[in-house]
Every structure is written in structure tokens, then in C-alpha cells.
Image (cartoon, helix red, strand yellow):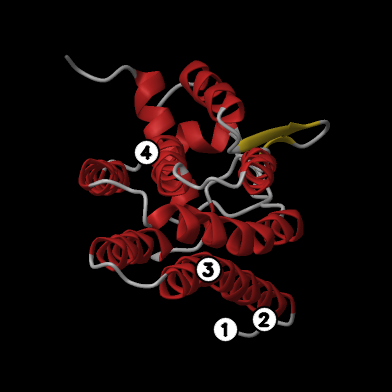
Amino acid sequence: MAESKAEQAYQILKRRIMDGTYGPGKRLVIDQLGREYNISSVPWRESLRRLEAEGWVDFVQNAGAIVKTFDTESWQRTMRLLARLGALATALSSEHLTADDIATCRALNREMADALANFDPRRFGILNREFHALLCSKCDDERLNDLVESEWARLELTRRSAFWYAPGRALASLAEHDAILDLIEGGASQEMIETATRRHDTNTIEAITRYEAEISESELSGVHGFK
């Protein structure tokens, strides 16, 4: 069955947002989109509302639809806490994880790769959450578990997938997942597992920070007429 015009418009916008063509704060003008892609206004309106519901687009008074700005500072604060708390919970859980648990994590990682190939950030984020929740699931420190869960809930309020915001980070993250699983499966010490898991999170923070700096430098160069 052929894709509807609304689905075509949605896929175009989602890919352009995720690959950086339409960056944070970019106005998405329906008339311009219609002329560029030869799709009428109604499908664009439907697709923009869908993207708004998914957290990719905001509707701003007197400006219309704009690509959502990533709340970097809030996200970084939460990620720094998760890098510590989640890594410790994973390390404490590791010696209690079964072969079936590891196999499930590897299956989740493969599903994440499929989501990445299909430009599906929402599914990628859900699977990533399941992956890390399972790694922490055998931690017997209830207070720590509550703290980790609280910070994950706070992280999800940002909605936007950090992995797509920093190009290339998603693929690197999958390789790091496998490396963590290899350590657990190989009977590595809790300290090694905690360090690797914490580094996995800080790598994401650093990738976002670098990309933010590149965007800022590019915008500044544009203002001053430099290429």
C-alpha cells in the first residue's frame, strides 16, 4: 500500500530534523514545504501536529511551527547524576544477572540497531530505557533504585533523543552496550563494570557538548560572514 501524503510529509520532516537539516529553532513554514516537496498544506499540518506530540516540534505564537530546542543544561544535570547512580546500580546488579538476562539485553541492543536503521528515535529511546533498566534490575539497594528511577523519569521529560541530536552517537552507544555486557558476562569486577557504565553515559554528555559547541561556532561564523 502506498504511503499517504501525511505519512510522506511526516517522514520527510523527521529525517530532516534528525539529520540536522532542520536544526533547533528552525521555522517550518507550510507554504515553503509545499513548494519544495509538492505536497499540499493539509498533510504538512497533520505531520507537524504528530511531531509536536512526539516532542520534536513546538508551535509558537506569531512564529508557527519550529523545531524544538534541546534543553541541554537540564539534560546534562540529569545525565551526570545517572552516570553515577546508574553505573553503581548496574555494578551492584551485575553479579546477579543470569545468562537469560544477558541474552535479553543483547536482543534489545539488536532491536535498537533496527530502530536506528529505521529512523525511529522514539522506539530507540524506549528500548534503551529497557536495556538499562534490566541491567539495574538485580540491584538490592532499594534507595538507589528509587533514585535511578526518579532521574530516568526526569530525563524523559526532555523528550528529545540525545542520540539523534549528536550525529553518530547512537551507533557508538550500541557498541558500548555490547562492551558492558561482555564485562558482565566475563565476570569482571564491579569496579570495572561501574567505570565502563559511567563512561558510557559521560561519552553521551561529551558528544552533546561538542555538538552544541559546533552549532554555536557555526551560527557565530554565519553572523560575522565567515564560512
Q: CA distance from mark 3 to mark 4?
A: 25 Å
Tag 2's secondary structure?
A: helix
Look at mark 1 in the image and give the residue it sits on. 227
Which residue bears the numbered disc 4? 120
Q: Amino acid at mark 2?
A: Ser
Label located before the other in sequence (1 or 2): 2
Q: Are marks 1 and 2 in contact (CB under 8 Å)?
A: yes
Q: Look at mark 3 in the image and give the residue it sits on.
A: 198
* Tag 4: amino acid: Asp
- Nearer to us in this view, 84 or 22: 84
Question: Which residue is pictured at 42% across the width and 75% down the height?
Answer: 192
Q: Which residue is mark 2?
A: 221
- Viewer-nearest of discs 2 and 3: 3
> Circle 1 — which element?
loop
Depth check, mark 3 against mark 4: the one in front is 3
Discs 1/3, front: 3
Q: N-terminal of the two: label 2 or label 3?
A: 3
Specify the amino acid type for callout 3.
Arg
Query: In the rendered structure, which disc, 2 or 4, sits on the residue that comes first in sequence?
Result: 4
Above or below for 184 versus 57: below
